[in-house]
Amino acid sequence: MNISKPLYPHLLQPLDLGFVTLKNRVLMGSMHTGLEEEKDGFHRMAAYFAARAEGGVGLIVTGGVAPNRAGWVAPFSLRLAKASQVEEHRLITDAVHRADGKICMQILHAGRYGYHPLCVAPSTIKAPINRFKPRALSDRGVRSTIRDFVTCATLARDAGYDGVEIMGSEGYLINEFIARKTNLREDQWGGSFNNRIRFPLEIVRGVRQAVGPNFIIIYRLSMLDLVKGGSTWEEVVMLAKEIEQVGATLINTGIGWHEARVPTIATMVPRAGFTWVTKRLMGQVGIPLITTNRINMPEVAEAVLAEGCADMVSMARPFLADPDWVRKAKEGRSLEINTCIGCNQACLDHIFARQSATCLVNPRACRETIMPFVKTAAAKKVAVVGAGPAGLACAVTAAARGHQVTLFEASGEIGGQFRLARQIPGKGEFAETLRYYQQQVQLNGVSMRLQVAPTAAELQAFAEIVISTGVKPRPIDIQGSEGTNVSLYPEVITGRKLVGARVAIIGAGGIGFDMATFLLHERSGPETPAAFMGAWGVDMEYGGEGGLGEVRREAPARTIYLLQRKTSKPGVRLGKTTGWIHRSILKKNGVKMLIGVEYLAVTAEGLRIRHEGREQLLEVDDVVVCAGQMSELGLAKELDALGMRYHLIGGALKAGELDAKRAIAQGTEVADRL
Ligand code: NAP
Ligand code: SF4
């Protein structure tokens, strides 16, 4: 008799909401993708959500939809306020229901975060992350906004949604009413806590009355504001109880306002790092609680539920990375999951740059209709040379399409620059991408030839040749640069060279920042949630407003100089949503960042530079060079000489602004065309 242990028994257990049962405890959390505002956006959203529903997720929540113009996140954001706007939403709800899924629409009023001149708030206090100052809503304005929420929810029901999520966190309008920080009103909507929560309670009460009992209402409650003047824990509990009373079906967790200076979802946040917050609320209300933030693998999600942190888990970005996340978990194939690495590079950074989102590790995300996966009708022999991110993406995609692929790699291991990235503290998730590719190589029958650098002659047997030979680090050429106290960044990251307690880093790009982080933390192991919270001043005892406490400081492992020749702000080209975190880590640890530096010589005493017109010696034991890269083009030149055709991708094509997002997208696109 084969008695196998059930897989993820908590995660895959249905959730009975009384009038409806969700097939498992996995919520695809709300995320703005930019498709909302694209031409043909509804068709594209329908395909995007349907793919996730087919993948087996228990409940989907759409990106935020404004209940009125003032609630736009940006001018002309998606709004649902009139019956004439209902029909297009049916494309989404029908597609999801055909795929046996369930979907709620999120109602989001941006409040003072609205990036437009019509933005409103409880009081006229400008957000530090917005240049538009809000207008304070009048009493009449507050009442009509509540009506707009109710109308929006009713229209969502008419459009076929299974429910709505009312966005009450992240520092948007509802949250602004609740927090003392942003609500200075003296009428019935401000002052005492009971007055400040009147706005969300009236909204949820009104929505419940309008939509009837058999419609899901999720309330996203800010359980940890992470700003001064935010809610206390006692207030969070009181609000949750009231929200239950006025008719919510589920309470979802919100962590941190957008203006908070604590990382909440970036890759350096420990996995499931904030689930302790939801756990505090468990048992205080009768309706199910959903927890969130940096949950990206089934093992993590299962542990969160098994430990009683919540009744359900929400993940947003992991469903960009892999639409089949739930199906793979269910079938015991979690090693095949394309894991979200929390980089934000192709999702949130795109949204901030007003581009539609996609995913660094899955370039088909949000492009389901324009970049479909199609099997080939004519299998070819394909050689891919170089198993970094570009080559891996190309090889596994081509093989999945039916081509016969050989992947050559000169070193003994796949991964290219990702092998270095995964060593950086807080970037351990990059190892997941390599695990994913390793699996795909095997599953798709790619013939892997490690420690083989093929010659042009050997490649003649292939119908298609893809060169993804990557990059080599750019050395510097100054007096003394050949000395033993000068290292290239890969030598240090791989441990081939050890450096002393005082280090100068030449080059303050992404790798220079990574190197500084690496050298600061080299002595410590992976960060625990408690260590992370302490370092960022989050009070896990939740003694005061917003959950903020003392920042715990540790002596840094080294004295570090981070240098660049340009006079621009260091790290200015780092990701929009993560750059501030990297700068903040370095500043907190006393890294001295110098700009406008001229490098003169390396001597036994250190690095001689000219800075602000003055020659000086930085007394350091070692100099680490992070001065960018050059394309590795030896093989491509050989092929050129023989007149052989090939496709050039990744860092080998363009070393400047070396970029994993571009590399993986290029690899996939070239494979799609073979
Ligand atoms: P990079 O961003 O191009 O930076 C190279 C640095 O080297 C620059 O600071 C440049 O500044 C300096 N440099 C260039 N040539 C030099 C020379 N001959 N001598 C001395 N200094 C020189 O390259 P990277 O740091 O290697 O990063 C590669 C890519 O990966 C980038 O696109 C980066 O954004 C990305 N990345 C991002 C992250 C992140 O977002 N956290 C992390 C890692 C990598 P000056 O010319 O002003 O001196
Ligand atoms: Fe996750 Fe990065 Fe993809 Fe965004 S771009 S979904 S953070 S892997």
Image (cartoon, rainbow, N blue to C red):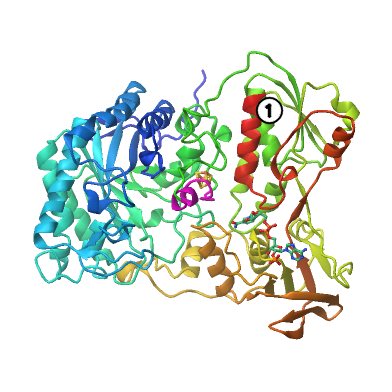
Residue drawn where x is 88% and y is 73% of the image: 479
Residue 463 in the figure: left or right of residue 243: right
Task: Name which quarter of the figure residue 11 lies in.
Answer: top left
Residue 429 in the figure: left or right of residue 183: right
Residue drawn where x is 54% and y is 50% of the image: 343
Residue under label 1: 442
Q: Nearer the viewer, residue 58 or 597?
A: 597
Three-letter code, disc 1: Gln
Q: Nearer the viewer, residue 76 or 541?
A: 76
- Residue 548 place in picture, x, y as percent: 38, 70
Residue 405 in the figure: left or right of residue 226: right
- Residue 538 place in picture, x, y as percent: 42, 67
- Residue 368 place in picture, x, y as percent: 47, 29
Check the image and report above or below for 525 versus 25: below
Magenta span contains residue 144? no
- Residue 149 place in picture, x, y as percent: 18, 47
Residue 241 in the figure: left or right of residue 270: left
Check the image and report above or below for 111 versus 403: below
Q: Is residue 225 visible?
A: yes
Q: Is residue 242 visible?
A: no
Check the image and report above or below for 44 versus 243: above
Q: Nearer the viewer, residue 583 or 674?
A: 674
Q: Which residues are magenta?
A: 342-353
Mark 1 vs ligand 2: CB below 8 Å? no
Residue drawn where x is 52% and y is 20% of the image: 2
Task: Name which quarter of the figure residue 451 lies in.
Answer: top right
Answer few, some or many: residues within 10 Å of disc 1's Cα (few below 14, many 20 plus, some between 14 and 19).
Answer: few
Magenta span contains residue 352? yes
Residue drawn where x is 85% and y is 34% of the image: 640
Element on which disc 1 rests: helix
Image quadrant occupied by the C terminus: top right
Q: Nearer the viewer, residue 78 or 376?
A: 78
